[in-house]
Amino acid sequence: MDDGRIPGLRAFAARVAGVFGSRKRDSDFDEEVQAHLQLLADRFAAQGMSREDAAAAARRQFGNTTMLQEDRRELRTLTSVEDLGRDVRYALRSLGRSRAFTAVAIATLGLGIGASTAIFSVIDNVLLEPFPYKDPGRMVFLRIRDTARGQEGERQGYTSNEFLEFAEQNHVFEGVIAASDDVVLYKQGEGVEQLYGADVTPGTFEFFGMPALYGRVTQPADYQPGAPPVFVMRHKTWMERFNGDPSVLNKTFVLNGRARTLIGIMPPRFGWYEADVLIPESPVRGVSTGFAGLPARWFLLGRLKPGVSKAQAAADATIIANHLARINPQDYPAHFQVLVKRLGDTVVGRFESTLYTILAAVGLLLLIGCGNVANLMLARATSREKEFALRAVLGAGRARLVRLLLVESLVLAISGAALGVLVAWGGLKLIVAAMPQNLIPAESVIELNTPVMVFTLVVAVLTAVIFGLAPALQAARRDLNDPLRDSGKGVINGFRTGRMRDTVVVMEVAVSLTLLIGAGLLMRSFVALREVHLGLQADHVFETQLPLPADRYKTAAHVRGFFQPLLARVKAIPGVVDATESSALPPYGGMDSKMEISGKSHEEEWHTQLQNVSEGYFRVLRIPFKMGRAFREAEINDARKVAVVNETFVSAFLCGEDPIGRRIKLAGLETLADPVSEPWFEIVGVVADVTNQGLERPVEPEVWVPYTVTGSGEQILLVRTQQTPMALMNEVHQAVWATDAGVALAFPGALEDRISQSLYAGPRFGFLLMTIFGCLGLILVTVGVYSVLAYATARKTHEIGIRMALGAERADVFRLVIRAGLRLVTTGVAIGLIVSLLLGRAIEAELWRGVKPYDPATLAGTTVLLLGTAALACWIPAKRAARVDPMVALRYE
Amino acid sequence: MTDAKKSEVLQGTLDLMILKTLHALGPQHGFGIARRIEQVSRDVLQLNEGTVYTSLLRLLQQRWIAAEWGTSENNRRAKFYSITARGEKQLAVETENWQRISGVVGRVLRLEEES
């Protein structure tokens, strides 16, 4: 028969039910027992016993009713749950009695749990679940990598032909869509405004599985030739440009000279391509010109069929790419590889490891917090030894005592978690404000949500176990008699708890040093990053893109007709030092072009960055010349085929030869919408290297040519100013509209600000948070070292009294305590250094090149900082110990 | 507590005996069950009558028996227990089990004596 002690599912359910309404059942049972006893007694009385004897005999025969009641309770309900309620009430009472302890513990835990929760929210919303789309995990895009050039030789933009080929010939995707840049100008009031648009292929909205917030998304009919032109707007743009006015829906806007009806506003989290407006467009084979006369480039996104791996997709796409390479060999490197990347990889990239580094840091911070609370609990447990011994003597099992203490920990941890949620809520606002917006997906909204709350709860429970288990086991392990017998303040007692507390402090110091070293390294790295010379002077430069209406600006002459008078007008503005045209924004170079040098033969293909500029470019950005000269105004006006190259170009292709006068062929110029025939250029000057691949990558060879050779390419205006660049915004705007009222300023701003945003924001975010957490860790460790020493000193007052009575000087006592403290700290530091060196590899990826994970200056600096702070923490208890009056200390017993 | 001449009731056997009693006599209160076991065992088994109630609770939890308030012969409120269909099935299974096991145990003991 079923053993009652191992209840089956049914019995368990009955027990769970039994937790409720237990009083009623107990009284029912009493009645039942009383009836039984009465019947037995009646029976004995009938056999001739006296009434008292009969009642006694009945009780004898029935057995011990109290034990029965206990048995029943154990059987009937989940005793542990009932006891748990009692334990929680007890824990609350006992914690309520020691307010200071409780406050410190909850604050420490709240800080640790709050920080972890905040960082986890960021990770959850940015890395784990950033996209609100249907099955975002299966959305991938393709990159073609030139195996000879590595990361530099990757492309992810495809021609219409390539897109159609991939979309139609693959066997691995459920659907393939694409988007392509489209700078959109529309009339607004007197002037023209610019929007960042995207042409989207049929099926785009179905692909994302997101309906419009207002109105509708595009339908297949909208892509039919002759269908009324329509477009869809992003929520953010609608709010910023139109204040969320619902009446703009179904209105007609003139976009790039064409009337289009706004049919829908997307929900806030729709951020595909980060486009302000989405315009339906069917790629057509053979049509290859996109905006600004540049070759059309479609960015592909495919949804993998269920069960298809990235490797399978890559294999399938490679077959198609090989086919395409045979048809258009000029578009493909000799040896290439097709990479399949997930949608999330587009933006997050390197920021991902920054976030995980910070999460690890926060975990360490929480660990230090746990250490502190564990130490407080240990100290508290020591002073509660007698209480526990008494409980044990009165019959509390060891498991029961451990549970009682664990419940206390849990109550602390849950309160800490509640506080932590508040901390996280406030902290998130700060983090989001400091967050580099360009490094996270446009779709992600950073907020506390259910997964985050579950995470917090799990962390709280784990925390309770980590900081509660050691003190609990310690308390339960002790011999019952000892604490009851001795007075608790002897010379040798408490040794075991002492060692445990010491271990915790050593661990804390080690973890804290690891954290500080991490923060220090990131700080060093950030400073090193800031010191990287861009090769140009970015301060006091105003920049704006000037997308010219494609219908009126087709040829080089058109473009020159706009820029010549504009540059003259801008230069005439008071406060303007110089102005120039450019086709690229530093610290990035222009387009990639194949290149040949007359008289040089070579096996592999030569590539160079190619940028169109006017003669003022090198003056505006203060780029020094190493050889030769700058463009002359006449050369720009006459569109002469002259070129300036950078030093990397010379060392890469013309090593040891005189570059001036050499002729180079820039094949990339032949592929433009306004092509340059016979693109042979003569080198007239060599400039110092300027960063042209961002800060992370080395400078690539670059060539500058007069902007007047072609009407294609992006147009950018750079202005060097005397005062703050943005102060001239209005004057520049007027000058642009005076030249052509149909041209809008796109992304106007200060060059320095944008560089700082795009290059420094990510590392700054990482190092800022690491420093904050490092400092918090340092504070916690200081508190930890102090409390352990203070506690140990207080307990050793008697011993110190004896020492002093036996002739120890105050200085000896002072040294004794300081030495005891520093021994712990130095042990911790040693361990911390070893751990940091071992973990060095983990953070290496985060560091700017040149900064090593074992950077001696950082290691030394943080070690000194930690030792100094710890010494301060030892100082006060040591002073106090030295002040002990031996007579008082001895009499105290 | 122990009486050398009487056997302690094996855990689980009491459950079986109660099921059988309810099966044979129909609804009974705790006192009645105790009397029946006393009568049948002819004082061989030592029984703290209170344990009957622990056993009853166990059986209730498995839903092998059901309980209902009624009036006892001396006109007091009493809880009457009756076997359920599920309990009947369990009784059949357990009875067979018991007989098989006791048969085996008996044989083993006899073998011991013979050798």
Image (cartoon, coloured by chain):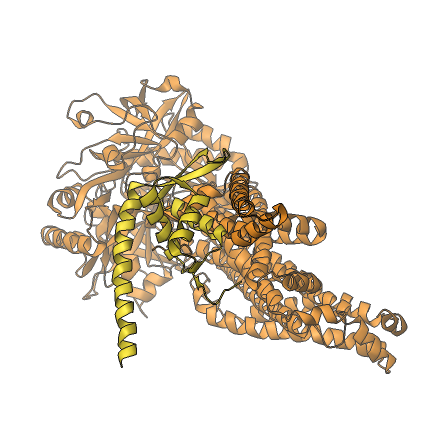
Chain colours: A orange, B yellow
- Is A152 in front, or is A453? A453
Left or right of B29 in this view: A792: right
Looking at the rendered image, the quarter that the C terminus of chain A falls into is bottom right
- Is any atom of residue A480 visible in this view? yes
- Is A419 in front, or is A682? A419
Query: Is B50 drawn above or below residue B104 in the view shown?
Result: above
Image coordinates of residue A175 in percent, x first then y, are 19, 41
Looking at the rendered image, the quarter that the N terminus of chain A falls into is bottom left
- Is A332 in front, or is A740? A332
The residue at the point 64 percent across, 54 percent down is A105
Left or right of A471 in this view: B95: left
Query: Is A278 drawn above or below residue B5 in the view shown?
Result: above
Image coordinates of residue A295 in percent, x first then y, are 22, 42
Image coordinates of residue A488 in percent, x first then y, are 75, 69
Image coordinates of residue A643 in percent, x first then y, are 31, 53
The residue at the point 17 percent across, 60 percent down is A334
Which residue extends farthest front?
A: A48
